[in-house]
Image (cartoon, rainbow, N blue to C red):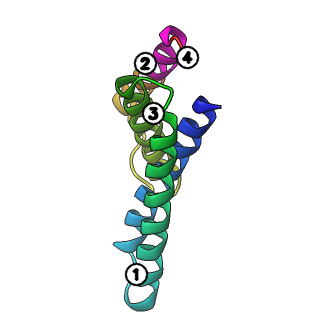
Amino acid sequence: MNWIFLILGGLFEIAFASCLGKMKETTGNATIMWGVGFLVCLTISMGLLLKATQTLPIGTAYAVWTGIGAVGTVLVGIFVFNEPATFWRIVFITTLICSIIGLKAVSSH
């Protein structure tokens, strides 16, 4: 169950980072709403990370949580915000995914 909390926390990290991206594209009330979304997603993400670290080593949990957030945010950037999908970006995102899988594989929990 702790890995489920961690994965969900990583997904909410993607959501709060995406809200930041939308905030810079908007003005007025829309910016405020994206800001509220950011705070809600941030709170949920941190709460899920906290829950996961009750049974997982903090180093593993934090690395996986940030890795999920980083990979997901890059993919959102590419598919939603039209950021470039260069060869090297894809190579390094792939190595990050492999590292996340590796941490899960060697974890004792």
- Which residue is at a point 48% across and 33% down the rendered structure image? 54
Q: Name the residue nearer the viewer: 75 or 107.
A: 107
Closer to us: mark 1 or mark 4?
4
Drawn side of residue 98 relative to residue 24, left or right:
right
User: What's the residue type where badge 1 is placed?
Assistant: Thr
Q: Secondary structure at mark 3?
A: loop
Which residue occupies the extreme front position in the image? 54
Q: Say above or below: 70 vs 107.
A: below
Label 2 crowd bin: few (<14), some (14–19), many (20+), radius 10 Å = some
Q: Which residue is mark 3?
A: 53
Q: Earlier in the sequence, mark 2 or mark 4?
A: 2
Res. 31 visible in picture: yes
Marks 3 and 1 sit apart, C-alpha to C-alpha, by 33 Å
Residue stretch rendered in magenta on the structure: 98-107
Residue 86 drawn at (x, y percent)? 38, 36
Q: Which residue is mark 1?
A: 31
